[in-house]
Image (spheres, helix red, strand yellow):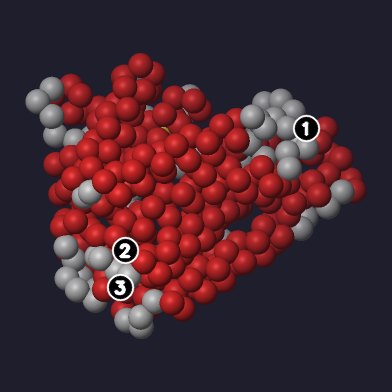
Amino acid sequence: MLPGQDDVLARIESALGDAVVVDDAYLNQIASHLIDAGGKRLRPLLTVAAAQVAQVGVRQEAILGGVSCELVQTGSLYHDDVMDEAPTRRGVDTVNAVWGNLQAILAGDFLLAKASEIAASLGTEVAGLLARTIMRLCEGQIEELRHTYNSARPEVSYLASIRGKTASLFATAARIGGLVADLPRPMVESLTAYGEAYGMVFQIVDDLLDLTASDDQLGKPAGHDMVEGVYTLPVLRTLQGGGVAAAELVGLFGKPLTVAERDKALAIVRQHGGLDAARRTAQQYVDQAVAACAALPAGPAVDVLIAAPTALLASV
C-alpha cells in the first residue's frame, strides 16, 4: 500500500468525478455510470507510485495523469460491453443495457476525448503517449477478434493481443508518473518496462480467474471467454498438451458454447496442466517487473512496486 493511499484514492475519485461533469445532465449520467460504480483504480495508483519514486509529495499532475489512463480504461470498457453485449459490469447494469448501444459508443468516445484533453494539459509528450496507447489498445483488440473461435490460435497472437489491449495502458500509466515527476530518462524507461510486465501479469491472472473462480466471485458466468470464442493462455496451453483433453476441446470449440459444453470445457481445462503452465508464464513477467525495479532508488514506492506483481499472481 502506498503511503497516504486513502488520501490519494480520494483525490483520484474527486478528479475522476470532475472530469465527467458536463452541462448536459443526460450525458453526465451516462459518462459517469461506470466511474460511480467504483473500481480498484490500479492504473492511477500506478501512476502515483511511479511519480513517488522521486520521493516527493503527490503532485496534482500525477493524479491527473493517472485519471487520464483510468478514463481510457473506462471508455474502452463501454466499447467492450457493446461488442460483448454484456448486461452487467462492476455489479451494475452496463451502459448499453440501460441506454442502448449508440449511447454507450458515444459515451465511450467522450471519455477517450476527456482523457486526451487531460493528457494534453500535461504536455505534448504525454498527449502523444496517450494517443499511441489508444492505438495499441485497438490493435490488441483487433488481434483478439481476428482469432475468435480459432482453436489453432498461435500463442504469439495471445501475447501480442494482451500486450496491446492491457499491458500498454499499464506501461503508459507508469511512464506518465515518471514523466510528470521529472525522473531521469533511464528511470522512466525502467518504469515503463515495469508497467508493461505488470500488465501482462494482470491479464494472465484475469484469464486464469475466468477459468478458476466461481460465478459469484466473478459476477458473471465462469468460462465466459471460451463461450465467446476467446481462447486464452491456459486454454491454449491445454490444447498444446495434446491427447484426449486437447481433442475434446477442439471438438467443442469453433462456435459459441452451450452451458453444458462450457461446463465440460471448464472441467477439462481445470483438470489438466494448462492452468499451471499459464501461471509459470505469468511468473516470468513477475520476474521481469521486479528486475525493472533494480534501476530505481530504494524507497517506499519502489517497495510497493516490487511487491505488487507477486501479490497479484498469488491471488490465483
> Of marks 1 and 3, which one's residue comes earlier in the chain?
3
Q: Please name which of the two marks, 2 or 1, marks the residue nearer to the observer.
A: 2
- Secondary element at tag 2: helix
Q: Give the residue type that dot 1 points to.
A: Leu
Q: Disc number at residue 53?
A: 3
Contact (Cβ within 8 Å) of mark 2 with mark 3? yes
Relative to residue 6, is residue 212 drawn left or right? Answer: right
Calculate the distance from the C-alpha at mark 1 to the C-alpha at mark 3: 49 Å
Residue count near mark 1 (Cα–Cα under 10 Å), binned few <14, some 14–19, many ≥20: some
> In the image, what residue occupies the spot 18% across and 22% down?
26
> In the image, what residue occupies the spot 30% across and 49% down?
125
x and y, in percent, of residue 184 in the image: 32, 70
> Of marks 2 and 3, which one's residue comes earlier in the chain?
3
Q: Nearer the viewer, residue 63 or 309?
A: 63
Q: Give the residue type that dot 2 points to.
A: Gly
Which corner quadrant of the image does residue 30 belong to? top left
Calculate the distance from the C-alpha at mark 2 to the C-alpha at mark 1: 47 Å
> In the image, what residue occupies the spot 31% across and 63% down?
178
Q: Give the residue type that dot 3 points to.
A: Val
- Secondary element at tag 1: helix
x and y, in percent, of residue 206 in the image: 53, 51
Relative to residue 71, is residue 16 drawn left or right? Answer: left
Residue 315 in view (yes/no): no
Residue 75 in view (yes/no): yes
Identify residue for label 1: 252
Identify residue for label 2: 178
Q: Disc number at residue 268?
A: none
Relative to residue 74, is residue 252 drawn left or right? Answer: right
Taking the view exactly as shown, the residue that stands out farthest to the right is 243
Tell me the quarter of the image containing the N terminus: bottom left
